[in-house]
């Protein structure tokens, strides 16, 4: 006789119900014991295995959570709540495609499920499938127009689609329902920034931060507004505070791509060898100049005479600034965004906001005035590449002028003819929205072929900058860099001004 046969179904249900009651009142340890007891007596039971998976998720043991919930769904795939919970775990691990699929499986079983629709919309938005995300949010709001949280994320999607007026209206709908909803205030501030209503944006974001001083998104959006107001010291300080709130802990290994794990281990070994213990390595302002002024007149002439607008500048930074930026990007734990192609991103809201970067941004504007024409700094980032994987695909940027410069030593580049940037001589059509000109590679290539576009290839050189019209399509050239942490290709991008609109 098996153990399960010696216990009645009623007793098994009673034990499970006791476990569920314990779980609901916060006694996780007691719930876990009871769920495990039911499984010991009835190994094929669905519900306790599913709920043990939920507990593992709550404990931050994501891999174990996925294993348990997936095993439960193999026994009974017809339970929508289990698919939703699986989606939650996959989402926490950054596995957005899988999470979207799991929420979709729940919706196939329970069409119109509000939780599944809302969360699938979030995954689709993060995957930049904005139209599909918007459809999910609208389906939620058609059934529940009182959900301020859905109005809020809908507004975020609309901002990312380049529809700031619609985004503002969505944020206002959320705030009508919940006037002190900080996430909606943060999104409203971002939409106002996109509408160039900077004073209104700052007022809204300050209101959000008065309600919740450590709100990372509101701090980051405040940094973006201040940047476009040419208040770079305040802007970068706001970004650093936001990063401290959002990235104080470490991402679990289960949430990292393979090349991200490899980088993080290389960096950890390098930091140990250097005796580096602080999260941020240097990056202070320099007493002297950061940008070399000797290039200014030649760059201005080239910019005025070139069509399309492309200028290549060697020896952009002073030796001191170049060395300081190398130390900062090698030793700082700021590389929090991983891409499937093989590169990592560092953004201002994740900590890439050193005072030295503000100094570089200010001096670029002051040194190359004829090029920047009083355009404020709109955004900036850095990418670091795996030497065996691909770089960034074809895209254009949401700005007027793009500055892209490289800081890894030339000795790391195994082929001096490649490794830099490929730029097409045709700009993205002004009527294309951000999702299309920044992410739709097939549309970009089709358009360029139709236009008979030609390419300009700029080979990699350390301390070389390429300044160009941000509307021009461009991509990373083929990468052939040596192995080793200090040999990873690093580029820094700064965007100035606003893209013209159709």
Image: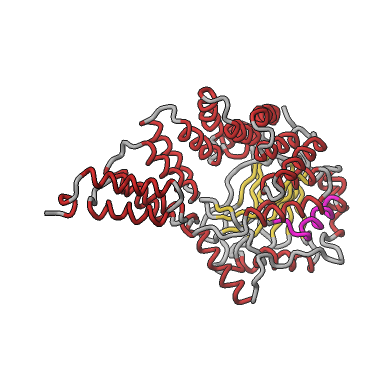
* Magenta span of residues: 352-365
**Residue shown at 78% from the left, 59% from the top:** 355
Residue 267 included in the magenta stretch of the image: no
**Magenta span main SS:** helix
Residue 363 included in the magenta stretch of the image: yes
Q: Where is residue 43 in the image (x, y as percent from the top left)?
A: 24, 51
Q: Quadrant of residue 450?
A: top right
Residue 50 or residue 107, whichever sits in front: 50
**Residue shown at 44% from the left, 30% from the top:** 113
Residue 329 or residue 232, whichever sits in front: 232
Left or right, residue 196 beside residue 166: right
**Residue shown at 47% from the left, 47% from the top:** 95
Up the image or down, 343 lies above or below 327; here it is: above
**Residue shown at 55% from the left, 64% from the top:** 264
Q: Which residue lies furthest to the top in this view?
A: 142
Q: Where is residue 234 in the image (x, y as percent from the top left)?
A: 81, 51
Q: Tell me, yes or no, if residue 216 can be seen here.
A: yes
């Amino acid at each position: 006789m098996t153990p399960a046969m010696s216990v009645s179904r009623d007793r098994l249900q009673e034990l499970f119900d006791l476990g569920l009651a314990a779980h609901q009142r916060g006694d996780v340890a007691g719930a876990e014991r009871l769920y495990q007891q039911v499984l010991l007596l009835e190994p094929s039971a669905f519900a306790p295995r599913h709920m043990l998976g939920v507990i593992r998720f709550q404990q931050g043991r994501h891999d174990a959570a996925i294993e348990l919930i997936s095993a439960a769904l193999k026994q009974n795939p017809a339970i929508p709540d289990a698919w939703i919970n699986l989606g939650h775990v996959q989402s926490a691990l950054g596995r957005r495609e899988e999470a979207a699929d799991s929420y979709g499986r729940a919706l196939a079983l329970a069409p119109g499920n509000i939780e599944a629709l809302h969360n699938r919309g979030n995954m689709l938005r993060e995957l930049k499938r904005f139209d599909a995300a918007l459809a999910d949010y609208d389906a939620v709001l058609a059934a529940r127009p009182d959900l301020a949280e859905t109005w809020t994320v809908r507004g975020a999607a609309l901002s990312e689609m380049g529809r700031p007026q619609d985004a503002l209206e969505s944020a206002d709908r959320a705030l009508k329902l919940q006037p002190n909803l900080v996430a909606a205030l943060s999104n409203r501030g971002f939409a106002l920034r996109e509408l160039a209503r900077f004073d209104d944006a700052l007022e809204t974001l300050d209101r959000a931060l008065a309600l919740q001083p450590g709100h990372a998104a509101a701090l980051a959006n405040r940094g973006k507004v201040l940047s476009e107001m040419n208040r770079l010291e305040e802007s970068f300080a706001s970004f650093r505070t936001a990063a401290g709130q959002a990235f104080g802990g470490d991402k679990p290994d289960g949430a990292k791509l393979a090349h991200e794990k490899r980088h993080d281990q290389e960096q950890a070994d390098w930091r140990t060898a250097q005796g580096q213990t602080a999260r941020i390595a240097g990056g202070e302002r320099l007493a002297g100049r950061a940008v070399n002024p000797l290039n200014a007149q030649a760059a201005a002439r080239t910019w005025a005479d070139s069509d399309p607008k492309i200028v290549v500048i060697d020896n952009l930074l002073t030796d001191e600034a170049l060395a300081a930026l190398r130390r900062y990007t090698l030793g700082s734990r700021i590389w929090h965004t991983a891409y499937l192609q093989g590169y990592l991103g560092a953004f201002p809201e994740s900590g890439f906001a050193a005072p030295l970067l503000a100094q570089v941004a200010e001096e670029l504007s002051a040194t190359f005035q004829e090029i920047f024409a009083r355009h404020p700094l709109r955004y900036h980032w850095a990418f670091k590449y795996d030497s065996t994987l691909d770089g960034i695909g074809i895209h254009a940027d949401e700005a007027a002028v793009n500055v892209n410069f490289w800081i890894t030593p030339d000795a790391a580049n195994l082929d001096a003819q490649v490794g830099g940037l490929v730029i097409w001589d045709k700009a993205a059509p002004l009527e294309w929205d951000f999702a299309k000109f920044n992410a739709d590679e097939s549309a970009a290539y089709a358009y360029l072929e139709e236009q008979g576009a030609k390419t300009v290839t700029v080979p990699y050189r350390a301390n070389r900058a390429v300044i160009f019209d941000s509307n021009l399509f461009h991509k990373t050239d083929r990468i052939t860099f040596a192995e080793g942490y200090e040999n990873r290709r690093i580029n820094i991008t700064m965007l100035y001004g606003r893209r013209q609109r159709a």
